[in-house]
Image (cartoon, rainbow, N blue to C red):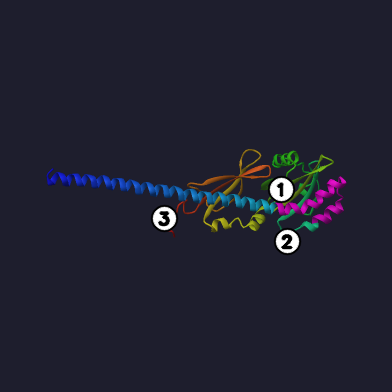
Amino acid sequence: MDSSEKFSSLKLRTAVLFLILFLSVGGAFLMLFHYMEEQEKLKAVYTAESTVRQVEAQLNRYLAESELIRRIVVQDGDLSESNFNTLSRLMQDSSGVIKAHELAKNGVVNQIFPMAGNEEAMGLDMLENPERKKEACLARDSGEYTIAGPFELMQGGMGVLLFDPVYYQHDFWGFSILVLDWDRLLEETEISSLEQAGYHYTIWKTGPDGQQVIIAQSEAEQYHDALTVDCEVPNDTWHFEIEPVNGWVRPGLWFGS
């Protein structure tokens, strides 16, 4: 083999070696990219589920406020208007999250505190009203509290209803209902801190007519590669769409910054 042939052979082996090295390094970077992306998505899933659990815990805290009223009804079979007003007055919170407390015997609202400003809700049949029927029936049939809304309230303003079913001697008696200011409750859970943590998000559920009901969302309106996390809440599923502002794998992560 003359020198030119040896040189050509060396060039070929060098090219093949470079190609193998290039493919190996490229494959390693691709594997690293997918690993980092998977880790970021796992982190997002945890963030979404933790956020929903935090909101749920806050709802449970307010629901506990009406526990005494429910126990009295379970024990005595009813609650006088004066006792209802006294207990409901004690339940009012300084932050203004609780807009009103209602009793709905047989599903029909028959007591409200405070009455002023909430007169439109009196006599409302929760088991028949189109916007409230689905959640009311779920609460009645399951024995678990159910969240209706957020929607425009009969008494005005946006809010949610917490249906707490009450049973007397194993028979359905009606509901103890909390009317909550949804925006103020979300402020208490500091859900907006997700944006400060670098996430775009939308939390939504399916409404009574199959339409999408927005529970909470960041200012971003468009998503490029959002991850959807389904979170179970009592008698419902919340869909949490979440995406990092700078994408799943930021350029700085490659260099540890």
Locate the C terminus by quadrant: bottom left
Element at badge 1?
A: strand
Residue for badge 3 = 254
* Residue nearest the viewer, comparing 237 with 13: 13
The answer to which of 61 and 149 lies nearer the viewer is 61
Q: Which residues are magenta?
A: 60-88
Pointer 2 residue: 94
Nearer-the-camera pick, 118 or 256? 256
For residue 161, which numbered disc appears in the image? Answer: 1
User: Is residue 32 among what the camera can see?
Assistant: yes
Q: Position of residue 50 (x, y in %)?
A: 60, 52
Quarter of the image with the N terminus in it: top left
Please indicate whether residue 72 sits to the left or right of residue 163 in the image.
right
Residue 70 in the magenta stretch? The answer is yes
For the residues marked 1 and 2, what is the alpha-carbon distance in whole angstroms? Answer: 19 Å
Which residue is outermost to the front? 1
Tag 1: amino acid: Leu
Residue 186's place in the image compared with 239, above or below, is: below
Classify mark 3: residues with Cα within 10 Å, few (<14), some (14-19) or many (20+): few
Kind of residue at badge 2: Ser
Amino acid under disc 3 = Trp
Tell me the residue at 66%/42% (across/down).
236
Q: Is residue 199 left or right of residue 252?
A: right
Density class for disc 2 (Cα within 10 Å; few <14, some 14-19, many ≥20) is few
Residue at left offset 30%, top offset 45%? 20
Quick one: SS at disc 3? helix
Q: Residue at x 13, y 47 (%)?
A: 3
User: Which SS does the magenta portion mostly show?
Assistant: helix
Residue 143, position as x, y percentages in the image: 75, 42
Whichever of labels 2 and 3 marks the residue nearer the N terminus, that label is 2
Q: Are marks 1 and 2 in contact (CB under 8 Å)?
A: no
Can residue 118 be seen here? no
